[in-house]
């Protein structure tokens, strides 16, 4: 299955994606899974302006991306899937998507969130969801860019919880 990367990044498509990831992972398509962006024409337009014209950008609701995954619509194009939150990735998994690994790339500071890695801030719900994804045999690796060291996100969470 040519899903090259599944990424959690609350900024979705931005400079690190275009300049850092796209140049290193050779994708034909970016599939953004977001109910919010899918319903906002201005956000869709802005996001499309950030993506090189050689790469197809598909923005769909979570349900729409799940349907595409289940129908194996990403069998041919080399695809990167991006969602903003762990709960959105879990939604796709619960609908039948099969992922071996999820890159946790950017979950930024918000009220009531604690920093677990330089680029990852979580609350209790995020942690529970990340652990659930991991318990399904899916690797959760944290890194901002492809050349960064891979960090086992769940092992890091568990270590932090035992260090308290």
Image (cartoon, rainbow, N blue to C red):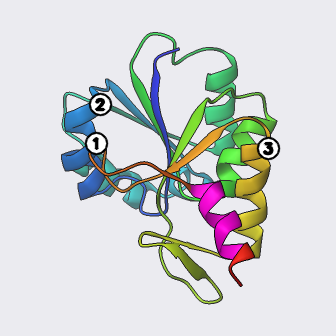
Left or right placement of residue 35 versus residue 5 in this view: right
| Label 1: which secondary element | helix
For label 3, the residue is 135
Q: Nearer the viewer, mark 3 or mark 1?
A: 3
| Label 2: which secondary element | helix
Q: Does the CB distance between marks 1 and 2 fall below 8 Å? A: yes
Q: Does the CB distance between marks 2 and 3 fall below 8 Å? A: no
Position of residue 74 relative to residue 80, above or below, is above
> Residues under labels 1 and 2: Cα distance?
6 Å
Q: Residue at x 57, y 36 (%)?
A: 101
Q: Residue at x 25, y 43 (%)?
A: 51
- Label 1: few (<14), some or many (≥20) within 10 Å? some
Q: Position of residue 8 (x, y in %)?
A: 52, 52
Magenta segment includes 155: yes
Identify the residue at the far bottom of this view.
Answer: 111
Magenta span: predominant SS is helix
Q: Residue at x 78, y 37 (%)?
A: 136
Magenta segment includes 111: no
For label 2, the residue is 25
Mark 2 and mark 3 lie on one chain; the one further toward the N terminus is: 2
For label 1, the residue is 21
Left or right placement of residue 88 versus residue 41 in this view: right
Magenta-tinted stretch: 153-161
Q: Position of residue 53 (x, y in %)?
A: 19, 33
Between 105 and 92, the one nearer to me in the picture: 105
The tag on residue 131 is none
């Amino acid at each position: 299955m040519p899903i090259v990367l599944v990424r959690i990044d609350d900024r979705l498509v931005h400079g690190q994606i275009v300049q850092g990831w796209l140049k290193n992972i050779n994708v034909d398509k970016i599939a953004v899974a977001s109910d919010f962006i899918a319903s906002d024409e201005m956000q869709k337009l802005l996001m499309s302006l950030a993506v090189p014209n050689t790469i197809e950008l598909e923005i769909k609701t979570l349900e729409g991306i799940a349907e595409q995954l289940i129908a194996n619509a990403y069998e041919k194009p080399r695809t990167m899937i991006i969602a903003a939150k762990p709960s959105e990735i879990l939604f796709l998994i619960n609908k039948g998507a099969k992922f071996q690994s999820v890159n946790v790339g950017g979950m930024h500071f918000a009220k009531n969130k604690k920093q677990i890695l330089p680029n990852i801030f979580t609350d209790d719900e995020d942690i529970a969801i990340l652990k659930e994804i991991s318990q399904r045999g899916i690797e959760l690796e944290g890194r901002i860019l492809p050349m960064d060291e891979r960090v086992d996100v769940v092992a890091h969470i568990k270590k932090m919880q035992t260090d308290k």
